[in-house]
Structures are given as C-alpha cells and as structure tokens.
Amino acid sequence: MTTRAAREFVEEEIGPRTLGRLLRGYRSSLKLSHAELAKRLGISQARLSDLEGDRKAISPGAAKRLAERAGWPEKDVIQAAMQTKFALSGIPYKVTIRKLRAA
C-alpha cells in the first residue's frame, strides 16, 4: 500500500488529518515525550496539549513557523492546521492546499 493510499484509507476511517492528529503522529513516530516535543517546537506543554487535542487552532503563518522549527513539510502542517480550523467551526469539508507557482 502506498503512502497516499494509506493516508486516504485512514482519512476514510477517522476523518481528515487535523493538526492534533499530525502532531501526535510525529511525536509517536519520533518517540518523543510531550515535554521534548514542546521544547523542540518552542511552545509550552499546555499549548502542545491543546493543539494535539484539537481544542485550539493556529493561523497558517504560525503553522509555517511550527513546520520550520520542527523540520517538517510546511504544506502538511499548514493543511492540517486549516483542517483543524474547519473542524472547530463545524465546517464539514476536507481542506487541500497546493503551492502557487512563482509568477
């Protein structure tokens, strides 16, 4: 099964990937504690807990900075952050983003 097929299967089963799901997945795959990931991202453990629990959303700019600090693909983090905003607003759509070509 390809990564794309696996991602689509998971999204069908549990819904689109939110920032919380993304953060928990990264933390788990890197075998980091809550404190270690919070330190790596430059945020408090309480803030990380809110983000992992999808109780709070962040702006696209904050998501970009978070991706840069962690060394993660910015597209994935920004898209997940926007999906969280949709979910918290009760908007039942899947967010997909793509980078614009340079003009």
Image: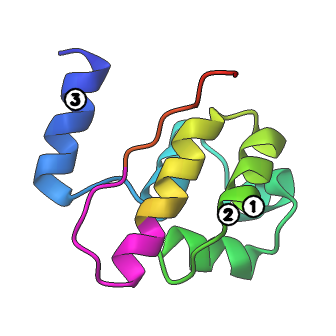
Which element carries disc 3, helix, strand or loop? helix
Can you give x and y, in whole percent of width and height, for residue 68 in the image?
Answer: 80, 40
Give the residue pinned by disc 3: 6
Give the residue pinned by disc 1: 62
Query: Residue drawn at (45%, 42%), measured in percent from left and top?
Result: 97
Give the residue pinned by disc 2: 34
The quadrant in which residue 7 appears is top left
Vertical position of residue 100 compared to residue 15: above or below: above
Q: Are marks 1 and 2 in contact (CB under 8 Å)?
A: no
Closer mark to the observer between disc 3 and disc 1: 1
Query: Residue drawn at (61%, 22%), measured in percent from left and top?
Result: 101
Labels in figure, total = 3
Q: Are marks 3 and 2 in contact (CB under 8 Å)?
A: no
Q: Earlier in the sequence, mark 1 or mark 2?
A: 2
Q: Earlier in the sequence, mark 3 or mark 1?
A: 3
Can you give x and y, in whole percent of width and height, for residue 46 in the image?
Answer: 71, 82
Closer mark to the observer between disc 3 and disc 2: 3
Range of residues picked out in magenta: 84-95
Which element carries disc 2, helix, strand or loop? helix
Can you give x and y, in whole percent of width and height, for residue 60 in the image?
Answer: 65, 58
